[in-house]
Image (cartoon, helix red, strand yellow):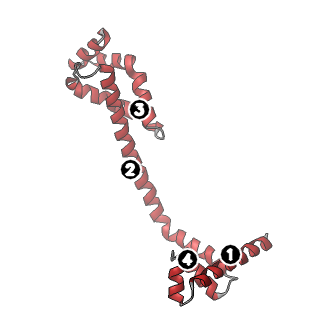
Amino acid sequence: MNECDLKIIQLIQSHDEQGIQLLLQQYGGLMKSICKKNLYHFDSHLDECINDCLFGIWNNIHQFDASKNSFKNWICVIAKYQSIDMLRKYQKDKATETLENNIVYLDQGLKLHEQAWFDLIKDLSEVDQQILTMIYLEGYKPEEVAAMLGQKTSNIYNRVSRAKTKLKFAKEDSQ
């Protein structure tokens, strides 16, 4: 272990803020690169992560054991795990926020989708509309639709194929 590391450790152990300043001068770039690597999409939280790393080093300096690892590697491990924890936290928050936003607009979105769907298939026969709605909107498999309507599965596949062709030609004609 070099003299600079020993000085940093002694200053931090004695709760001298100069130790943190020396730590940042010596290893700040390394900590930043490790945090940035793990927080790839959350650059706005980089400073917060580095501050958490410094806080973790400040509070846990007594756990550093020079016989097990170098000071540099110990700092790297703290930076790595702090950034991973922060990534988990903000990914969870982002997922929850996205989910809440989707729930708010779900009912409105379903109404819009249903309206667009029925506008799309309005020119098909009633049976074809029913089959396509069951398969594409309600999520049934063609085999299940055939059983519900008392028809052969091949008949359902043929009707779907023909309905798609009709829709394709109707779209081309409207353009």
Q: N-terminal of the two: label 3 or label 4? A: 3
- The residue tagged 3 is 35
Closest to the camera, between mark 2 and mark 1, is: 1
Q: Nearer the viewer, residue 15 or 160?
A: 160
Residue 102, how many percent across, how many down? Answer: 47, 62
Q: Secondary structure at mark 1?
A: helix
Closest to the camera, between mark 1 and mark 3, is: 1
Dot 4 crowding, Cα within 10 Å, few <14, some 14–19, many 20+: some
161 horizontally vs 72: left or right: right
Type of the residue with mark 2:
Lys
Q: CA distance from mark 4 to mark 2?
A: 34 Å
Q: Secondary structure at mark 4?
A: helix
- The residue tagged 2 is 92
Type of the residue with mark 3:
Cys
- The residue tagged 1 is 164
Q: Nearer the viewer, residue 124 or 118?
A: 124
Dot 3 crowding, Cα within 10 Å, few <14, some 14–19, many 20+: many
Residue at 46% over, 40% down: 42
Circles 2 and 3: CB atoms closer than 8 Å: no
Type of the residue with mark 4:
Ile
Q: CA distance from mark 2 to mark 3?
A: 18 Å
Above or below residue 88? Residue 98 is below
Name the quarter where the N terminus is drawn: top left
Type of the residue with mark 1:
Lys
- The residue tagged 4 is 135
Q: CA distance from mark 2 to mark 1?
A: 41 Å
Above or below residue 37? Residue 71 is above
